[in-house]
Image: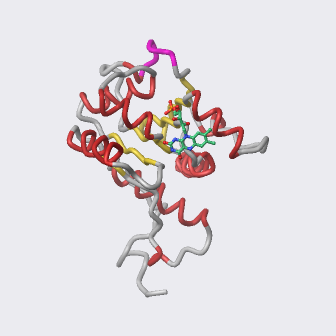
């Protein structure tokens, strides 16, 4: 089993978070620790519109956003990487400052200080120089900024296929073996 931490913050993209989590859960070898910010819960009200799309059902453990006693708040609690999907510009700024004011920001800070992999899926457009500087700051501290940018050469026709490919590429960043994404010159041989 690989233990991963997934933070969900209040940017647009709750359906993306749900689909990525669903693909992770489907792997069967990932122990998923989920942390959802208060901002994310607000955005969910707009983006799930009462549908049965809870994120929690894909997680093995759910940690409260203000629980600084939870495992992910400590460097001695081991995991194989953290993902923030989607990451708001507010959370990005907090991580870049090292403030650690909630469990997602603290867990991200701890992930970086322990030199573990932090993959951040930002969501905002267009970007200001402030956003870009914050992305550069956390990249220099070891994070990977990974916008959701579908690979059209994979001939995917549905959003779900695009998200499945993306979920696999996130796991690649965490060096977690997976076959959920198609691979150029391995499983993708012909041009569309
Ligand atoms: C419906 C909705 C959509 C939002 N979309 C974004 C977004 O795409 N990117 C962003 O940075 N903030 C977005 N926000 C603003 C954040 O939710 C807000 O800055 C919040 O304080 C983020 O807190 P958190 O990072 O702790 O979740 C959105 C807010 C709402 C209500």
Quadrant for residue 14, please give it. Answer: top right
Q: Nearer the viewer, residue 178 or 113?
A: 113
- Where is ligand 1, by quadrant? top right
Where is 7 relative to 136, above or below? Answer: above
Q: Residue furthest top?
A: 69
Q: Residue furthest right?
A: 50
Where is residue 164? Give x, y as percent: 53, 60
Q: Which residues are magenta?
A: 66-71
Q: Nearer the viewer, residue 89 or 35?
A: 89
User: Going 54% across and 59% down the picture, which residue do you hit?
Assistant: 163
Q: Residue furthest left?
A: 140
Where is residue 172? Give x, y as percent: 36, 54
Quadrant for residue 169, please give it. Answer: bottom left
User: Going 57% across and 26% down the picture, which residue do you hit?
Assistant: 62
Magenta span includes 20: no
Q: What colour scheme governs how the chains and residues are painted in the rendered image of this protein? A: secondary structure
Where is 45 relative to 71, above or below? Answer: below
Where is 166 relative to 102, above or below? Answer: below
User: In the displayed structure, does residue 147 sit left or right of residue 163?
Assistant: left
Q: Nearer the viewer, residue 185 or 47?
A: 47
User: In the displayed structure, does residue 133 sit left or right of residue 166?
Assistant: left
Main secondary structure found in the magenta portion = loop
Where is residue 80? Give x, y as percent: 35, 37
Magenta span includes 69: yes
User: Going 49% across and 61% down the picture, which residue do you hit?
Assistant: 180
Q: How many marks?
A: 0
Where is residue 48? Give x, y as percent: 72, 45
Locate the N terminus by quadrant: top left
User: Going 38% across and 53% down the picture, which residue do you hit?
Assistant: 146
Where is 1 relative to 122, above or below? Answer: above
């Amino acid at each position: 089993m690989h233990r991963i931490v997934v933070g969900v913050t209040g940017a647009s993209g709750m359906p993306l978070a749900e689909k990525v989590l669903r693909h992770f859960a489907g792997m069967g070898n990932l122990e998923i620790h989920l942390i959802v910010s208060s901002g994310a819960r607000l955005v969910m009200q707009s983006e799930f519109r009462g549908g049965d799309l809870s994120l929690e059902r894909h997680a093995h453990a759910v940690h409260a956003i203000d629980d600084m006693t939870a495992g992910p708040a400590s460097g001695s609690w081991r995991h194989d990487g953290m993902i923030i999907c989607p990451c708001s510009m507010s959370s990005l700024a907090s991580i870049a400052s090292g403030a650690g004011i909630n469990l997602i920001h603290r867990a991200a800070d701890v992930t970086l200080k322990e030199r573990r992999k932090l993959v951040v899926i930002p969501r905002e457009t267009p970007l200001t120089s402030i956003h870009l500087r914050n992305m550069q700051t956390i990249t220099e501290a070891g994070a990977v900024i990974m916008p959701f940018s579908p690979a059209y050469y994979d001939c995917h026709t549905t959003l779900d296929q695009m998200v499945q490919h993306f979920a696999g590429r996130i796991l690649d960043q965490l060096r977690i073996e997976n076959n959920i994404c198609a691979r150029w010159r391995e499983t993708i041989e012909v041009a569309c």
